[in-house]
Image (cartoon, rainbow, N blue to C red):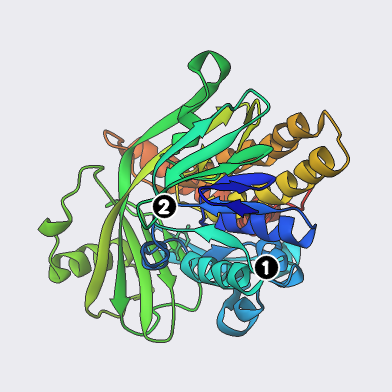
Amino acid sequence: MTDGAVTRTRVGIVGAGPAGLMLSHLHHRAGIDAVNVDNRTRHEIETTVRAGILEADSVRLLTETDVSDRVLREGHAHEGIALRFAGESHRIDFQALVGESVWLYPQTDVFTDLADARARDGGDVRFGISDTRLIDLTGDRPAIRFTDADGAAHEVRCDVVVGADGSHSMCRQQVPETHRRLFAKEYPFAWFGFLVEAPPSAPELVYTHSDRGFALISQRTASMQRMYFQCEPDEDVAAWSDDRVWTEMQSRVAGPDGFVLREGPISDQAVLRFRSLVCEPMRHGNLLLAGDAAHTVPPTGAKGLNLALADVRVLATCLERALDDGDPDALDRYGLLALDRVWRTQHFSYWMTQMLHSLPGGDHFDRRRQVAELRSVVDSTAGATYLAEGYTGWPRG
Ligand code: PHB
């Protein structure tokens, strides 16, 4: 309900990325009114290149809740990945090990599908807002105040506020330090990511350990690919000509099997900083945090979006119980339920990261030990199954 500068709704969501939009979509299906606000424009979100792997449950969430089935038509099921080390590739066969696949489908497409579904269903989503402030989070009249895209002051009054506003979350910062604990880990490296105009170099993702550092070969379409290599956190993108990138990439993947990357013009270069972070609890009064606002994982394993979708699936149910059934404990149950997957995923992303990246100051011992760890994973059904379970996503609890 909108009355001039005030909108009344039940769930006010800061953030209209995939997590925020999926939450309002699920609420819409349950008959709960919600409003999303985001300081980015739709165009900005749609044109920021992000990761591209969806767990099977993320795909089911998109298709079974009627967001869109485009992922099934335009995405690509991947039944495994390759771990490449000592110059040789070793396939982890997800289907054979756990009977699941992942889907190559860029996060920007997930966002577009959700934004279209919200528009189709008459959802109230305000992009391009500014000056967001949260009011009365621990009282009984919580609200989100902001300046809308046309410069007018606006207030969304709600029962609860959800902070789904990404890793630099303004909402997280509203929780007094005395009421939250941040568990954080910094990594002494980053990824240099780029798009390549060329055919795929491999049919599935190739996670590569080499003496020169990590490299990841991912895909997008028949003519566009996505790749990454480990770099310094303060790496200067401008210092990397296409030639220099290709020399580095080719040397990281080279091996006796003669694997070479198919080269092409490079675009969208960016340095991705690494960080692991968990904020506990995920609730403060009538504020609930979801997705990157509550936790950040390093990109190894592509868990960020999947974990955010898993959060909102749990959060949607807990909010329904709290708002529709008046269950007083439902808001606290959200964090208790969500944090189990959050910490497993933190461990999985950390584990893949430390197994595959060169540690600054690392010596021959460290590299030999990593190769032994990788061999233990690929040569053991138990090891490979652990990787396959974590990569395709644990069953929803
Ligand atoms: C990607 O395709 O962008 C991607 C895939 C797997 C990752 C990270 C990024 O672990």
Report the amino acid beneath label 2.
Asp
- Crowding near the residue tagged with mark 2, few <14, some 14–19, many ≥20 C-alpha atoms within 10 Å: many
Quick check: 222 left or right of 250? right
Amino acid type assigned to the residue bearing label 1 in the image: Leu
The N terminus lies in which quarter of the figure? bottom right
Q: Which residue is mark 1?
A: 62
Instruction: Estimate the x, y position of residue 143 in percent, counting from the top left.
Output: 57, 36
Front-lying residue, 77 or 282: 282
- How far apart are labels 1 and 2 at the CA level? 29 Å
User: Which label was assigned to residue 86?
Assistant: none
Kindly identify the residue that appears in the image at 60 percent across and 49 percent down.
307
Q: Position of residue 131 (x, y in %)?
A: 37, 41
Q: Secondary structure at mark 2?
A: loop
Q: Residue at x 67, y 49 (%)?
A: 312
Along the polypeptide, which appears first: circle 1 or circle 2? 1
In the image shown, does 39 or 153 lie closer to the viewer? 153
Helix, strand or loop status at disc 1: helix
The spot of residue 174 in percent (x, y) is: 49, 27
Q: CB of residue at label 2: within 8 Å of ligand 1? A: no
Whole-percent x, y for residue 165 in the image: 49, 45
Q: Quadrant of residue 353?
A: top left
> Which tag is nearer the camera, tag 1 or tag 2?
2
In the picture of the structure, the residue carrying the numbered disc 2 is 148
Q: Is residue 385 above or below residue 75?
A: above
Query: Is residue 294 visible in the rendered structure shown here?
Result: no
